[in-house]
């Protein structure tokens, strides 16, 4: 596409001698955090159903792809066309039910076949869990690992069984807290969080999204409390816990919103 080629030419000029000093200084590692940030900005645009912003953020993300490919080309490793070619080949190879003669009934079977093909391609991997990046957010990584285990049959049958596991982990956490063992407390709390992520997966929900929504709800209600306290001419630290909880409960039940 002419637009993609133009973008490649712009990036090349930025990286050439006499180009932009900042762009010339960048490396794969230095751009890593910005790449992650751009991914989250794309997700936020999707969540807000903001097509105009989504278009812009996808462009920013594409810039990172082109920039990393350009840096690789400068090192003699690979170039953008090879990146595009490799993903095209992968998509065709991993969709034999579309581009080949195989027949697959539903999306669950598609995922199983995808994983089977991936295992054949990645023969150096010894576990179905290999390939899950450790740099993923913890809840996202936990759910991805759980999904991979589930695809080979290692899974709870019903969500209710996961609820029982959560109760079990909660009891073990209470015991660790009573014993006052910091290491065990951390371990049991981790087990409890992992089980909650598992419940999200069994309910067909993304734990990262659910937690983000709960965090945003807390932040919204907390700001409401701050506003209510300020309207009383007071500061948060001057209020007792009981007073703050009373304002919180009023906001929770919509009393503050309706005033």
Image (cartoon, rainbow, N blue to C red):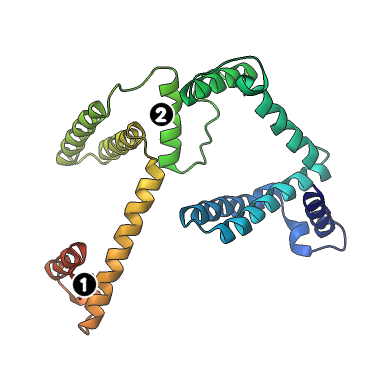
Identify the residue at image location x=46%, y=44%. Answer: 137
Identify the residue at image location x=13%, y=70%. Answer: 243
**Horizontal arrangement in the rendering, residue 55 relative to residue 43 (left or right):** right
Identify the residue at image location x=55%, y=29%. Answer: 131
Quarter of the picture holding the C terminus = bottom left
Q: Residues within 10 Å of mark 2 (few under 14, many from 20)?
A: some
Rendered view: 91 above or below 17: above
| Rendered location of residue 40, percent (x, y) | 52, 52
- Seen as rendered, the residue at the extreme right is 17
Rendered view: 119 above or below 42: above
**Horizontal arrangement in the rendering, residue 190 relative to residue 138 (left or right):** left
**Horizontal arrangement in the rendering, residue 184 relative to residue 116 (left or right):** left
Task: Say which element carries label 1.
Answer: helix
User: Label 2 to label 1, Cα distance in Å?
Assistant: 43 Å
| Rendered location of residue 24, percent (x, y) | 78, 58
Q: Name the quadrant containing residue 191.
A: top left
Rendered view: 237 above or below 97: below
- Which residue matches tag 1? 258
Q: Is residue 258 shown to the viewer in this render?
A: yes
Rendered view: 215 above or below 131: below
- Which residue matches tag 2? 146
Mark 2 / mark 1, whichever is N-terminal: 2
**Observer-nearest residue: 49 or 177?**
49
Identify the residue at image location x=56%, y=50%. Answer: 39
Q: Residues within 10 Å of mark 1 (few under 14, many from 20)?
A: few
| Rendered location of residue 13, percent (x, y) | 84, 58
Specify the label residue 212 is tagged with.
none
Task: Say which element carries label 2.
Answer: helix
| Rendered location of residue 200, percent (x, y) | 33, 37
Q: Is residue 79 shown to the viewer in this render?
A: no
Q: Which is more foreground, mark 2 or mark 1?
A: 1
């Amino acid at each position: 596409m002419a637009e993609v080629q133009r973008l490649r030419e712009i990036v090349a000029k930025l990286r050439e001698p006499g180009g932009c000093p900042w762009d010339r200084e960048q490396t794969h590692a230095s751009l890593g955090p910005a790449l992650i940030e751009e991914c989250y900005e794309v997700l936020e645009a999707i969540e807000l159903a903001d097509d105009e912003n989504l278009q812009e953020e996808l462009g920013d993300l594409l810039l990172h792809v082109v920039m990393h490919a350009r840096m690789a080309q400068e090192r003699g490793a690979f170039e953008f066309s090879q990146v595009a070619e490799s993903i095209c080949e992968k998509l065709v190879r991993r969709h034999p039910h579309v581009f080949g003669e195989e027949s697959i009934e539903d999306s669950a079977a598609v995922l199983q076949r995808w994983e089977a093909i991936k295992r054949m391609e990645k023969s150096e991997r010894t576990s179905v869990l290999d390939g899950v990046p450790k740099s993923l957010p913890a809840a996202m990584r936990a759910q991805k690992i759980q999904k991979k285990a589930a695809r080979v049959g290692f899974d709870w049958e019903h969500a209710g069984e996961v609820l029982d596991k959560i109760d079990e982990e909660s009891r073990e956490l209470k015991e660790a807290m009573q014993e006052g063992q910091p290491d065990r407390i951390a371990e049991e709390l981790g087990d409890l969080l992992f089980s909650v992520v598992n419940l999200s997966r069994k309910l067909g929900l993304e734990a990262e999204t659910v937690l983000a929504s709960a965090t945003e709800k807390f932040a919204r209600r907390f700001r409401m409390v701050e506003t209510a306290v300020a309207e009383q001419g007071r500061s948060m630290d001057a209020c007792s816990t009981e007073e703050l909880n009373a304002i919180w409960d009023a906001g929770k039940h919509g009393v503050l919103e309706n005033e």
